[in-house]
Each structure stands twice: as structure tokens, then as C-alpha cells.
Amino acid sequence: MRAVVQRVREACVRVDSDVVGEIRGGLLVFLGVGRADNEKDADFLAEKISNLRIFADEAQKMNLSLLDSGGAMLVVSQFTLHGDCRKGRRPAFIAAAPPEQAEPLYERFVAQVEKLGLRVAAGRFGAMMEVSLVNDGPVTLLLDSRGAF
């Protein structure tokens, strides 16, 4: 499972011009599920991302987690995180999980974050979405539950 995590001042996701999820301050997480992923991957990333110390403390050092800072998380599914661009000019998405496998793992990730006590907003799985954000820092991190990077 892969994630692009961005610290944001605000973020929202729209489907057909309707806002389906938005936050004011916290993390925007683009989440991609791979064919080899399972519940352990979802649980690992939910815990890892929620506890990343990437928010400023009183000394302005990145020392606080999302849990510490009281922010929220917006989660957006993005199968293209498993796009392979090494050959040719068109990405291959063979490594991305099919929707029937990916959606339950995406939902599990969201549920695990909620269990940790965070407020979570989410996009709509499988929909064409428009994502707006104000990046804070900017701070952007790449995570992979299997240590690929």
C-alpha cells in the first residue's frame, strides 16, 4: 500500500462539483492499494501516518503527530500510485489492486484512522474527483507499507 502524505492548512475533494470531504488543518493522504496488499498493510499505514511527527511544536520543530496536533485527515483513493512508468510513455497499472480488492482495504484504512481517535473525511472510491489543497510547509512524504521507498 502506498501513500502520498501532505501536511495541509485545508483540503477538500469534490465529485460532480459536490464537496464529499473536507478538512481544515491536518493531512491529505492519497492512498493506493496494490495487488499484494492486505489488512496488515492498511493497519500499518494508518498507524504510521497518524503518528508521523511532522507538525511543529512550541519551538517550531517538527515534533508533533496528527494525534498530538488535533488535526484531521482527508483520505483520497488513488490507484495511479501503483503506476509503472519505467518503460514506454504510458503508465502500466498491473500492480494496482482491482476495485473489489482495493475498496475494502481503503475503507479499512479509514476505519483504523478513526479508531485512533482522528476525524477523517474521505473521497468517493472509484469516482473522478477534484482535489483542492493548501499545502503547509510544504511538507510532502511518500510511504510504502512494504518498504519500497
Image (cartoon, grey):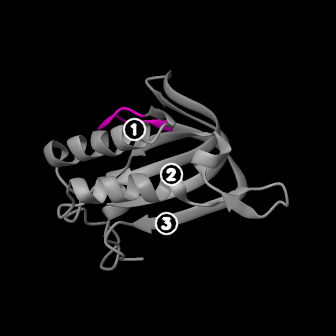
Q: Amino acid at mark 1?
A: Lys
In space, the residues marked 3 and 2 are separated at their CA atoms by 14 Å
Dot 3: what SS?
A: strand
In space, the residues marked 3 and 1 are separated at their CA atoms by 23 Å
Dot 2: what SS?
A: helix
> Dominant secondary structure of the magenta stretch?
loop
Residue that numbered label 1 is attached to: 115
Residue 142's disc is: 3
Quadrant housing the N terminus: bottom left
Marks 3 and 2, the one that precedes in the sequence: 2
Horizontal relation, residue 23 to residue 20: left or right: right
Horizontal relation, residue 147 to residue 74: left or right: left
Q: Amino acid at mark 3?
A: Leu
Residue that numbered label 2 is attached to: 50
For the record, the magenta segment spans 123-130
Say which residue appears at 45% left-offset and 59% top-offset. 48
Question: Nearer the observer, disc 3 or disc 1?
Answer: 1
Measuring from the top left, give residue 136's x and y in whole percent.
72, 51
Say which residue appears at 19% left-offset and 44% top-offset. 99
